Image (cartoon, rainbow, N blue to C red):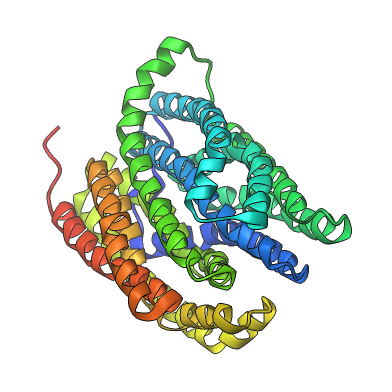
Amino acid sequence: MQARRAKFLEGNLFRHVTVMSLTGSVGLMAVFIVDLMSMLFISMLARPELAAAIGYGGTIMFLVISFGIGMSVAAGAVVAMAVGAGDAAEVRSKTTHSVILSAIFGVIVMLASWALLPLMVSALGATGEVYDQTIHFLAVVILSVPFLKVGMVGGAILRAHGDARRSMSSTLWGAGISAILNPVLILWADMDLTGAAIATIASRIVIAGVATWQVHRFYKGFVRTTWGDMIADVRPISRIAVPAILAQIATPLGYALVTRAMSDFGEAAVAGMAIAGRLTPVAFGVIFALAGSIGPIIGQNHGARRPERVRAAFFASLGFAGIVVGLVSLILFVLRAPIADAFHAEGLTRELVYLFCGPLAALWYFIAIIFVANAAFNNLGRPFTSTWTNWVRSTIGTIIPVWIGARMAGAIGVMWGQAFTGVVFGLLSLWLALRLVRVPPPAP
């Protein structure tokens, strides 16, 4: 049985990259903007401990989300390769089993996170009222983890078919729910962090529901299956998922190390970092979307044995990323004062916001290179390359420059150290990826 024609095997690749990234970014940025709004609403309460709790909680949720990113990378890769090969039965099998496994894995991660919450929050350096508020916030929001995993995998499957528009619409629905509930629960119902957590849960339930419904409705993506069939697909999915998850959790580990270093300089420093953390996905939502969009383009052409288009897609992505980062950096620099004012940022917090909206934003191009390179590694059969580079970057590659930066310039030096790490490993990832995309695939 033949699958429908793979979308990315023909046509202008820069256009494919641009359309997939821009449409994908609309949904992503809608979610990120809502998260940013929740931070704004919490800031309006004029309680620094709540803003700091959001910062610590965001670091831990970043770790939890990374497991879902790894699963979505694997699902997108195996489905895209099956689409490129024209095997409809394989597409449906991989789709069904990816979604089921993501739900099971989500429950496991949720239970493990609950058990480890006190240890993780303490390890970040939270104490007193901030510690209590962070635990309270996370204990509620972690309920959304299984839905988060299913929603991310559903969106990745839609992108694997080249359907960025429907992948975008699922996140837009979720963002809309959150945008309504956040002000109502945080401000009107006076539920502060509890309200923010409930809004997040509702949003992720909607995203999971809409994404999986669209996979079934438009691609007949789900089939009856058995435990035996699902176990048979565990190996090809886990072959990508395990290294992808290991690679993804390295990033929040590095962020946790930075947060721990920042906690030595007080709540104002952690709040400044939290604001930068919320601004980052909004400002660079297109780059985050690029990371998920280039994978299916590479995967389909790799599955169809079109190495010249794989290389062209890689270079088109780098060029597109350069244009986006340049424009965003300029906008952030011009708007740095209004942005800081919106968060009522003063003193050290304001300095950190200004630093992010200045030179650190421009250096984000090197992070974009890492995203594109990781997509190439995961879809060209070298997932462990992204694993070891991410782990080295997030451990020793982060600890040394952040420690030096903290000793030389305090909280500002911490952020400079983190940026320096991105530059070094962006260049390393580029070199490794160039070597990979220049190698023709083996004969069938």
Q: Position of residue 67 (x, y in %)?
A: 45, 40
- When the figure is inspected, residue 172 is found, relative to residue 359, above or below; the finding is above
- When the figure is inspected, residue 45 is found, relative to residue 215, above or below; the finding is below
- To which quarter of the image does residue 49 belong? bottom right
Q: Residue at x 35, y 30 (%)?
A: 238
- To which quarter of the image does residue 35 belong? bottom right
Q: Residue at x 23, y 59 (%)?
A: 429
Is 195 placed left or right of 221 in the picture? right
Q: Quadrant of the N terminus?
A: top left
Q: Nearer the viewer, residue 312 or 387?
A: 387
Q: Quadrant of the C terminus?
A: top left
Q: Nearer the viewer, residue 223 or 417?
A: 417
Residue 214 visible in rendering: no
Q: Nearer the viewer, residue 83 or 373?
A: 373
Q: Position of residue 117 (x, y in %)?
A: 56, 41
Q: Position of residue 164 (x, y in %)?
A: 52, 52
Q: Position of residue 169 (x, y in %)?
A: 63, 51
Point out the residue furthest to the right here: 188
Q: Residue at x 83, y 61 (%)?
A: 187
Point out the residue furthest to the front here: 128
Q: Residue at x 16, y 52 (%)?
A: 436
Is 397 placed left or right of 230 in the picture? left
Q: Nearer the viewer, residue 163 or 401?
A: 401
- When the figure is inspected, residue 37 is found, relative to residue 361, above or below; the finding is above
Number of on-image labels:
0
Is 204 placed left or right of 364 in the picture? right
- To which quarter of the image does residue 255 belong? bottom left
Residue 152 visible in rendering: yes
